[in-house]
C-alpha cells in the first residue's frame, strides 16, 4: 500500500501573489496545480492525505485532474475544523469509511474557548484485504495571533489528537493507525511528543524517518525567512510498525516539488 501525505499549499481561492503581483480572490495558479498532479501521478499512490484544501469542490478538482492524468482515486473524504478556509481531504483507490468524530474538539486558553483549527480527519480504508485507519491533521501554523501563544495552541490541538488516538487504541489495542499531516513543529517540540506519546507506552506512535535522495530530512521551505524545516510526518501504531517498508519510504524530492507547494510530499510504503 502506497500512501502519500502532502500539504498542497493553498489549493483554494484567496488573495495571493501571482508572478509577484497581488491578485484578489485567485485560485491556485494552474502551473502549481499541474506540478502537484504530476508528482502524485508519477508516484502512483493508493491513498493520498492532503492538507490546505479549500472547499469540497477543490478536493473534487484534484481528484478529477488526477483521473484525467491516469491516476484514478475514485473515493474521497473531506473535513475540517473551525478554520473556514483550509480543510483536510483524503483520496483513495479503495472505498473510504468515515470513522467516528473525536469526542473533544475544543480547548481553553486564557479564559477563551478555541476549537481545533483544521479538525481531525478520521477515515478507515481496506487495501488488499488489510484495514488501515487514517488520522490526518494540520496543526496551528507558526503565524502569531494577537494575545495568544501559537505554540501553546499547537500543544492543545496535539492533546486533542492524542486523546482521540488513545480512545481508538483503548477500544482496539491492535488498531492499524496511520497518523499523519503537517504538525507545523519539529521532532523535539512538545506538540510532536504529545502526539507520539512515550516510547515505553503501548500506544506509542513511531514516526517514519523519511529522507530524500541526498539523505536530508526537511519537508518545508519558508521562503520569506529562508528556513528549511521538518514539519510533515507519517506516524504508525505498534500494530502497523512491522509492515512499514522503511528503506523504500522517502521524501519525494524531484526537481519540480517547489513548483507545486512549499512542502515536499512523503511517500510511505506498507508491505
Image: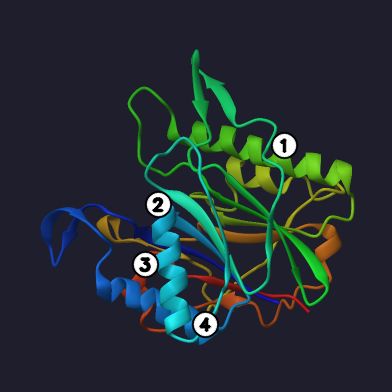
Residue 38 in percent (x, y) is at 41, 82
In the image, residue 170 sits, relative to residue 259, either above or below, namely above
Secondary element under disc 2, as helix, strand or loop, is loop
Residue drawn where x is 65% and y is 68% of the image = 209
In the image, residue 196 sits, relative to residue 232, either above or below, namely above
Q: CA distance from mark 3 to mark 2?
A: 18 Å
Picture quadrant of residue 270: bottom right
Q: CA distance from mark 1 to mark 2?
A: 27 Å
Quadrant of the drawing holding the N terminus: bottom right
Q: CA distance from mark 4 to mark 2?
A: 21 Å
Residue 160 in percent (x, y) is at 64, 35
- Inspect this view and state whether residue 228 appears: no
Secondary element under disc 3, as helix, strand or loop, is loop
Secondary element under disc 1, as helix, strand or loop, is helix
Residue 43 in percent (x, y) is at 54, 83
- In the image, taking residue 96 as reference, residue 131 lies left or right, namely right
Q: Which mark is residue 55?
A: 2
Circle 4 is placed at which residue position? 71
Label 2 Cα neighbours within 10 Å, binned few <14 / some 14-19 / many ≥20: many
Circle 3 is placed at which residue position? 261
- In the image, taking residue 268 as reference, residue 61 lies left or right, namely left
In this view, the mark in front (4 or 1): 4
Circle 1 is placed at which residue position? 163
Q: CA distance from mark 4 to mark 3?
A: 20 Å
Label 4 Cα neighbours within 10 Å, binned few <14 / some 14-19 / many ≥20: many
Residue 119 in percent (x, y) is at 55, 42
| Residue projecting furthest to the left | 21
Q: Earlier in the sequence, mark 1 or mark 3?
A: 1
Amino acid at each position: 500500500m502506497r500512501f502519500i501525505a502532502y500539504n498542497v499549499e493553498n489549493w483554494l481561492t484567496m488573495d495571493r501573489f501571482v508572478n509577484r503581483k497581488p491578485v484578489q480572490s485567485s485560485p491556485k495558479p494552474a502551473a502549481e496545480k499541474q506540478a502537484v498532479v504530476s508528482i502524485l501521478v508519477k508516484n502512483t499512490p493508493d491513498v493520498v492525505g492532503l492538507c490546505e484544501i479549500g472547499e469540497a469542490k477543490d478536493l473534487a478538482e484534484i481528484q478529477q485532474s488526477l483521473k484525467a492524468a491516469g491516476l484514478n482515486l475514485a473515493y474521497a473524504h473531506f473535513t475540517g475544523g473551525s478554520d473556514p478556509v483550509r480543510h483536510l481531504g483524503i483520496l483513495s483507490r479503495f472505498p473510504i469509511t468515515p470513522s467516528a468524530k473525536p469526542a473533544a474538539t475544543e480547548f481553553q486558553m486564557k479564559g477563551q474557548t478555541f476549537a481545533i483549527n483544521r479538525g481531525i480527519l478520521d477515515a478507515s480504508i481496506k487495501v488488499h484485504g488489510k484495514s488501515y485507519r487514517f488520522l490526518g491533521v494540520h496543526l496551528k501554523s507558526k503565524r502569531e495571533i494577537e494575545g495568544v501563544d501559537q505554540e501553546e495552541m499547537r500543544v492543545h490541538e496535539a492533546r486533542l489528537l492524542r486523546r482521540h488516538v488513545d480512545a481508538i487504541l483503548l477500544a482496539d489495542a491492535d488498531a492499524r493507525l496511520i497518523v499523519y499531516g503537517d504538525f507545523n513543529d519539529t521532532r523535539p517540540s512538545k506538540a510532536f511528543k504529545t502526539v507520539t506519546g512515550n516510547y515505553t507506552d503501548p500506544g506509542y506512535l513511531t514516526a517514519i524517518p523519511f529522507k530524500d535522495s541526498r539523505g536530508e530530512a526537511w519537508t518545508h521551505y519558508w521562503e520569506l525567512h529562508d528556513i528549511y524545516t521538518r514539519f510533515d510526518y507519517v506516524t504508525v501504531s505498534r500494530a502497523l510498525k512491522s509492515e512499514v517498508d522503511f528503506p523504500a519510504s522517502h521524501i519525494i524530492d524531484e526537481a519540480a516539488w517547489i513548483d507545486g507547494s512549499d512542502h515536499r510530499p512523503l511517500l510511505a510504503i506498507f508491505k
